């Protein structure tokens, strides 16, 4: 304890008066080995008062008692100060013993201060926590320098808290440690925010990767669809020419069907990259599910047994590629859950009649129910509660994005459906997807098949891909049209300017060098406002059916296109003129 000179004088003045005390103490200090300092240790103060008491015949205990009271007052002030500090504060008398502690520290451990003071670290902390703290304490007693650390501590009732701990040694006149003052600031919230920040940064990186995938998907779609167009067109024409029941016709049908699957796969890639709007049409869900099973079967290990009970159900109004994505995601999750030990993957599709109270928020009626179950690791209730949250995943880092089931949930809800899950740890999971069926008269209108019509109008075809121009020309000539073709939008415009009345219809590609399809269409319509134009594209972010029509373009077709679809679109365009 440190005593100021004025306090020393005040203690002695209790007996002899202030002026006398000042003179005597000043004289005693000057005569002693002590310099005329302003601050003295408690031992030095007691010695001075004792020597004065002996010389002047005063009661030594009076001065000593006053010094003890002064020390107690100092201790109370120190306690009040420490207890008003929000951070935890404690003194260490050695590497593993608590000295003074403040109220914040006692509150954290749920104890009274007097029950903490004098305790060993191992009496309060867990074995691991005590070992870590003692290691730091040994370092400070050895190095005699302040150290700063970050530590996680648990009070036995709550989640661990993160603390920023500062340990500062108090040295005596000989350079030895009297005690160590420790302060701990709770930085749990800061750590949580840092963790959340990292998660957000990871999500941003994932979003940027998804954006890059979308851009890549768009480029692939454009080029790939241009490659598929002639394959689809030639195989379709050759298949129509081949003799019925011949090997040639069967071989050509395999090429034709494989190309259509490739075309649909491109649509799925575009749908996944969020670059394609929903295209709701009456569909047979059993066809979608069987297609998804075909695609995923090669990825599933032989240790997983696939069982299916897929019934041809009524039509539902849905986007084919979106429902395909739902099936693929659920099938993928199911086999991932059984990847290590194998198991049974069961796929069931059937119609069910729901009553008013069967599914919360769902109207009564007939639904197509897709059930995908596995015998894998299963989930606990806390996981089930978060399973459809964006970016929540139970998979290892790098294996899951946390988007799959969130996307599935969004797709089903947007289709007026419902998805539920039942799971138990160690017993597998079962997902149920419900989609409402549509009425028969609605389906008849949607799936009405129109015959291919032939005619003899004059058509200008424009595409920078030579193979695409050639297949379009052959398809159109087969339909009876008089065709002029160009592989340059600039040359096509010159041909039209030379004789505007020589054409009844323009079919142009969208993405071309020098002049895009929509720009060509605008220049042609400036010359002839009544000329009908069909715009084609393998993929374009800048163009859609709605935007094309807002520009005065009659139809918008996605390549590759079948002869039947091309014929119907041309007739609809020309007949509405």
Image (spheres, grey):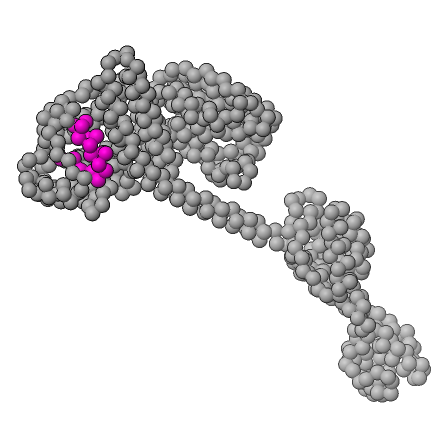
Spot occupied by residue 62 in the image (x, y as percentages of width and height): 88, 75
Q: Which residues are the magenta region?
A: 460-476
Q: Which secondary structure dominates the residues rendered in magenta?
A: helix
Quarter of the figure with residue 549: top left
Which quadrant of the rendered structure holds the N terminus?
bottom right
Of 146 and 509, nearer the camera is 509
Residue visible at 23% across and 38% down in the picture: 465
Position of 81 with respect to 388 (left or right) is right
Quarter of the figure with residue 91: bottom right
Position of 274 with respect to 56 (left or right) is left
Quarter of the figure with residue 370: top left
* Residue 424 visible in rendering: no
Compared with 427, 43 (above or below) is below
Spot occupied by residue 61 in the image (x, y as percentages of width and height): 90, 74
Residue visible at 71% across and 44% down in the picture: 156
* Residue 471 visible in rendering: yes
Position of 171 with respect to 218 (left or right) is right
Spot occupied by residue 445 in the image (x, y as percentages of width and height): 24, 20
Compared with 507, 239 (above or below) is above
Residue visible at 53% across and 29% down in the picture: 336
Spot occupied by residue 181 in the image (x, y as percentages of width and height): 73, 62
């Amino acid at each position: 304890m440190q005593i100021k000179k004025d306090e020393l004088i005040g203690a002695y003045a209790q007996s002899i008066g202030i002026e006398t005390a000042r003179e005597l103490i000043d004289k005693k200090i000057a005569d002693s080995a002590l310099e005329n300092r302003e601050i003295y240790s408690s031992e030095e103060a007691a010695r001075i008062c004792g020597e004065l008491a002996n010389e002047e015949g005063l009661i030594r205990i009076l001065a000593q008692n006053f010094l003890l009271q002064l020390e107690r007052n100092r201790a109370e002030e120190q306690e009040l100060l420490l207890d008003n500090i929000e951070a935890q504060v404690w003194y260490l008398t050695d590497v593993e013993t608590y000295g003074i502690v403040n109220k914040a520290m006692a509150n954290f451990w749920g104890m009274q201060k007097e029950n903490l003071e004098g305790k060993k670290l191992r009496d309060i902390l867990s074995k691991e926590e005590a070992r870590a703290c003692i290691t730091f304490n040994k370092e400070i007693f050895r190095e005699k320098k302040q150290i700063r650390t970050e530590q996680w501590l648990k009070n036995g009732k709550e989640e661990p808290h993160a603390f920023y701990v500062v340990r500062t040694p108090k040295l005596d006149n000989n350079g030895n440690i009297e005690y160590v003052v420790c302060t701990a600031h709770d930085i749990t919230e800061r750590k949580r925010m840092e963790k959340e920040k990292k998660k957000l940064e990871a999500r941003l990186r994932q979003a940027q990767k998804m954006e890059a995938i979308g851009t890549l998907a768009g480029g692939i779609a454009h080029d790939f669809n241009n490659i598929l167009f002639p394959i689809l067109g030639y195989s379709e024409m050759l298949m129509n020419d081949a003799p019925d029941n011949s090997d040639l016709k069967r071989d050509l049908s395999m090429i034709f069907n494989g190309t259509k699957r490739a075309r649909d796969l491109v649509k799925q890639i575009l749908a996944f990259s969020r670059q394609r709007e929903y295209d709701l049409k009456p569909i047979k869900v059993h066809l979608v599910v069987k297609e998804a099973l075909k695609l995923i079967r090669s990825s599933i290990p032989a240790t997983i047994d696939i069982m299916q009970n897929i019934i041809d159900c009524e039509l539902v109004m849905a986007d084919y590629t979106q429902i395909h994505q739902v099936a693929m995601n659920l099938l993928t999750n199911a086999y991932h859950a059984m990847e290590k030990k194998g198991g049974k993957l069961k796929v069931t599709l059937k119609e069910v009649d729901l009553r008013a109270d069967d599914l919360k928020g769902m109207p009564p009626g007939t639904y197509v129910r897709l059930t995908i179950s596995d015998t894998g690791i299963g989930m606990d209730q806390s996981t089930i509660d978060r399973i459809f949250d964006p970016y929540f995943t139970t998979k290892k880092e790098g294996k899951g994005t946390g988007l799959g089931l969130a996307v599935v949930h969004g797709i089903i809800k947007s289709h007026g459906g419902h998805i539920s899950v039942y799971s138990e740890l160690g017993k597998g999971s079962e997902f149920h997807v419900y989609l409402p069926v549509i009425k028969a008269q609605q389906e008849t209108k949607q799936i009405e098949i129109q015959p291919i019509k032939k005619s003899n109008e004059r058509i200008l075809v424009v595409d920078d891909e030579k193979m695409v121009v050639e297949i379009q020309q052959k398809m159109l000539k087969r339909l009876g049209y008089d065709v002029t073709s160009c592989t340059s939008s600039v040359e096509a415009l010159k041909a039209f300017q030379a004789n505007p009345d020589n054409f009844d219809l323009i079919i142009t590609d969208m993405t071309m060098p020098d002049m895009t399809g929509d720009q060509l269409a605008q220049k042609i319509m400036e010359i002839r406002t009544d000329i009908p134009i069909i715009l084609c594209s393998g993929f374009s972010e800048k163009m859609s059916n709605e935007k094309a029509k807002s520009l005065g373009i009659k139809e918008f077709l996605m390549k590759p296109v079948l002869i039947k679809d091309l014929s119907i679109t041309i007739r609809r365009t020309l007949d509405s003129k």
